[in-house]
Image: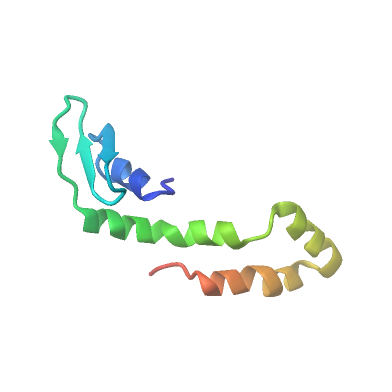
Amino acid sequence: MANKWTDCVFTLYPTVVTMHSKDGKTYTCKDKDNKEVTIDSNLVDAEFAKIEYKNKRLEEYPDWQTQLDYIYHNGIDKWKTDIVNPIKAKYPKPS
């Protein structure tokens, strides 16, 4: 699974083997024969948006030990209500 914008480029354009950027925004992509590959950044942005909510959720969830401790002391239903649901609401899955 891709988790960065550049990973999405490699997923959508399997012929790309190298990417270089001077400013972190514009990339030069090349294939195995060192020929430039033109990418559609709007397509890559759309693909990245599909997975970015997962990255944001992962950053926000507490570590698994904390979550297990919460479940032990408060139960699964309270864990879902207090921890899982607010994060899912904050970063909804795109439709």
Horizontal side of residue 13 vs 91, given as left or right: left
Horizontal side of residue 84 vs 32, given as left or right: right
Residue at the extreme top of the image, as rendered = 33
The relative height of residue 79 versus residue 47 in the rendered view (above or below) is below
Horizontal side of residue 65 vs 37, given as left or right: right
Q: Residue 73: x percent and y percent?
A: 86, 65
Relative depth, front residue between 23 and 45: 23
Q: Quadrant of residue 29?
A: top left
Q: Quadrant of residue 14?
A: top left
Relative depth, front residue between 93 and 5: 5
Q: Quadrant of the C terminus?
A: bottom left
The relative height of residue 24 versus residue 95 in the rendered view (above or below) is above
Residue located at (14% from left, 36% from top): 36
The relative height of residue 34 versus residue 6 in the rendered view (above or below) is above
Relative depth, front residue between 83 and 76: 83
Tell me how many marks there are: 0
Q: Quadrant of residue 11?
A: top left
Residue located at (40% from left, 68% from top): 94
Residue at the extreme right of the image, as rendered = 73
Residue located at (24% from left, 44% from top): 27
Which scheme is used to colour this image of the protein? rainbow
Q: Residue 1: x percent and y percent?
A: 44, 45
Horizontal side of residue 4 vs 54, given as left or right: left
Q: Residue 2: x percent and y percent?
A: 41, 46
Q: Residue 15: x percent and y percent?
A: 22, 34
Residue located at (54% from left, 75% from top): 89
